[in-house]
Amino acid sequence: MDSLRELFKIGNGPSSSHTMGPERAAKRFKAENSNAASFKVELYGSLAATGKGHLTDWIIIETLKPLNTEIVWMPEFVHEFHTNGMKFIALDADGNEIADWTVFSVGGGTIVSEGEQRGGANSVYPLTNMEQVMEWCGKNRKEIWQYVEECEDSSIWPFLERIWEAMEQAVETGLSKTGVLPGTIKYPRKAQSFYRKARRDQSRNGFLGRIFAYTLAVSEENGGGGRVVTAPTCGAAGVIPGLLYALKEEYNLSKEEVLKGLAVAGLIGNLIKENATISGAEGGCQAEVGAACSMAAGMSAFLLGGSLEQIEYAAEMALEHHLGLTCDPVGGYVQIPCIERNAAAAVRALDSANYSLYTDGKHTVSFDQVVITMKETGADLKCAYKETSTGGLAKFNFDAEC
């Protein structure tokens, strides 16, 4: 199982699979073909279907500059390896092909070449499911964050500190902005108004309002192409930082606690990525916001003093109640229903953690079983509900958001 460095990535939104992944691929292909006179890039499946709204063509063209790049949209072709496929072609001055590379953006900004193994590129975790991790923790009388440290070594903490700083910056930048997001929907930024209302309310509702505000701030930044952290994806980037920022503020958490919480969340996200998927194009939004909610729930249970069993229960519950969630972005933008959905999931994550803390941690369905079920459910979903903007809410035309 890969390092958390392959899960948490800092970059520009609005989509880790449609923006960050193609950008990484373009940089690599450009570096390997410095003798090219121009480029052509074929975009397949879901990557082509919603690429315009996700700025896929823009980021590829910008990355391959100053050379000219032709983008060929092929949404009707879905590669059997993964729906987010693309083929980079290098051309000489006469227009002849001199090199090509078929590559896939498999979620969270991760790219995989055709024929390459999906996981294990930077493998550091020998245990690959929650049952094994819990057994290790029990046997060694250690916590999940200590298992992360054991596998990653102490260098993981400076890395997670940079990740947290980027998350904090995304919250604060998002809160400072007003106006509408790019695109034909004219979606208004709401984070700042939510925060102004929430900060004067000292009740439970005020705390929830701040969670909403902080989560919206990051999700709006992402929707506008701002700098965020994949957690585990850009489309779900608001859940963990929004909730963690609020918990840090509410409970005066130390930086050490925050980083341990991120380690717990990261391990949960890694298990989902390893055994199912975090790609909306492959598994629907259950794989993105559902995974983020699960990560945030386990993180919250840990920070609120939960046992190992309660942490697992919280993560299981949060994912279980997102099973079947569709990915139907209106207009191909990561705005409706994505932004609102992040805010709702942040509160659901906290609710899942609190629920688990009222129990002894014993429950019927395990986290590992829910992860496998999520993978199977994603495979069963029609392609219209997996980031193609051809089904669900995406069928409706919205000129402007009220």
Image: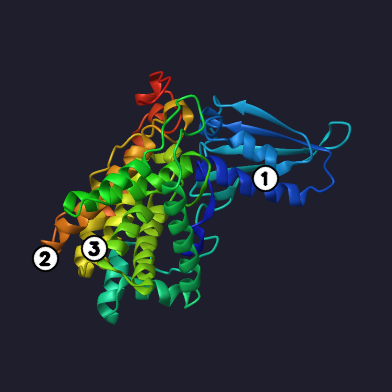
Q: Is residue 172 visible?
A: yes
Give the spatial CA distance, label 3 vs label 2. Answer: 13 Å
Q: Are marks 2 and 1 in contact (CB under 8 Å)?
A: no
Q: Which residue is mark 2?
A: 360
Residue at image coords 63%, 40% = 59
Q: Would residue 231 be visible to someone looking at this image?
A: no
Give the percent coordinates (x, y) of residue 342: 34, 44
- Three-letter code for the amino acid on which mark 1 is drawn: Ala
Q: Position of residue 293 (x, y in %)?
A: 31, 50
Label 2 – label 1 distance at C-alpha: 50 Å
Mark 3, secondary structure of its residue: helix
Task: Answer with mark 2 or mark 1, whichever residue precedes in sequence.
Answer: 1
Number of residues whose C-alpha sits closer than 10 Å to that of mark 1, classed few (under 14), some (14–19) or many (20 or more): many
Which corner quadrant of the image does residue 190 belong to?
Answer: top left
- 349 horizontally vs 356: left or right: right
Q: Residue furthest bottom?
A: 140
Q: In front here: 177 or 276?
A: 177
Of the numbered discs 3 and 2, the one sitting upstream in the chain is 3
Kindly identify the amino acid type of the residue bearing the numbered disc 3. Ala
Badge number at residue 26: 1
**Tag nearer the camera, 3 or 2:** 3
Is 303 displayed left or right of 190 in the figure?
Answer: left
Q: Is residue 61 above or below residue 302?
A: above
Relative image position of residue 1 (x, y in whole percent): 45, 62
Q: Nearer the viewer, residue 100 or 182?
A: 182
Please report the residue visible at 26 percent of the width from the left and 48 percent of the height from the top: 198
User: Mark 3 sits on what residue?
Assistant: 301
